[in-house]
Image: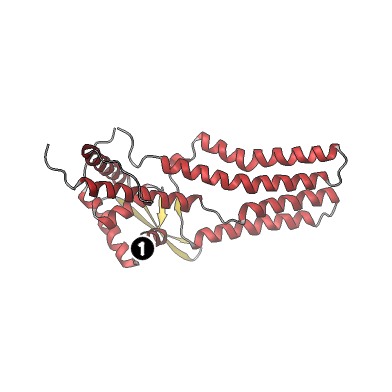
Amino acid sequence: MTSPRFDELIHAPTRLSIVSLLAAADWAEFRFVRDTVGLSDSALSKQLTTLESAGYVEVSKSFIGKRPSTSVRLTRTGRIAFTGHVAALQDIVGRAGLDVIPEA
Amino acid sequence: MGPEPIPPADAARALAEVDARRDQVVTATTRQPAWHLPSLGVAGIGFVAGLETERMWLVPAASMVVAVGGIAFVVSLARRGVAQGPSPLFGVGDLLAVLVALMVIPLICGLGVGFGLYAVGVPVPATLGAVAGALALSVAGPLLTRHLRRRLTRLPAAPAR
């Protein structure tokens, strides 16, 4: 059972986008996250550093042939924090009696 | 109970954002080039035609199509960046759906048409059967993708409480 726990760190709009993306995947390439969320390299790096300091993400650097590759994944701590945050959001919406309809 | 940390409307928008990002990952991890499955179908036709008509050069040519297509597919994935989809995707049901769509249906179509045409004396029945199998693959593939996307986007962002 997931305990709802509102997480201020995750809730910041840009970090929510990043963490939501990572939560839907086992791992993601840095380029994929950057291009999908629409950030510059430095802006994404800054957000990932913040999330990494909290223990929410893990950043791995490797080489594919000669091409450097950076991949990112949510840690177990990050997934627990994310699911708790989503549960808290659902609780807030539920108590207000709203229907959550994803935007078209 | 204390005040809510954010207004309900903001919470609803945040949940919509979570859903939208999940949909993006689902789309990215289930997308494949439109030419990929048809190229496999064409290669299958070439392989069968080569054996049936004893034009053996078609067999390695068909193998090259599969190899080149596979490489091009991987390159297209690498260029656009990659996300590895969620592990819950490949449950037994999903694996069965993949096998049925990409193997069973094309095989049944191909063998059924091939044997049927052979029975009535149509020339090159196996090749024509392979054509039917390739067409079935071209149809079943996108349907499978649509099914997997629908299934993935129905997965809850947080487990039900």
Q: Residues within 10 Å of mark 1 (few under 14, many from 20)?
A: few
Residue at 25 percent across and 51 percent down: it is A10
Look at the image and tell me whether residue B135 can be seen: yes
Q: Taking B116 as reference, is A45 above or below it? A: below
Look at mark 1 in the image and give the residue it sits on.
Answer: A38
Give the x, y percent position of residue A6. 21, 44
**Which quadrant of the rendered structure holds the N terminus of chain B?**
top left
**Which quadrant of the rendered structure holds the C terminus of chain B?**
top left
> In this view, which residue lies farthest toward the right?
B121
Q: Secondary structure at mark 1?
A: loop
Give the x, y percent position of residue B79. 50, 63
> In this view, which residue lies farthest toward the left?
B2
Corner quadrant of residue A48: bottom left
In the image shown, does A30 or B128 lie closer to the viewer? B128
Answer with left or right where residue A94 lies relative to residue A61.
left
Give the x, y percent position of residue B4. 16, 43
Figure coloring: secondary structure
Look at the image and tell me whether residue A54 can be seen: no
Residue at 70 percent across and 58 percent down: it is B64
In the image shown, does B34 or A5 lie closer to the viewer? B34
Answer with left or right where residue B112 lies relative to residue B24.
right
Instruction: Look at label 1 and name its amino acid.
Output: Gly
Answer with left or right where residue A102 lies relative to residue A69.
left
Corner quadrant of residue A18: bottom left
Q: Which chain's residue wears label 1?
A: A
In the image shown, does A77 or A86 lie closer to the viewer? A86
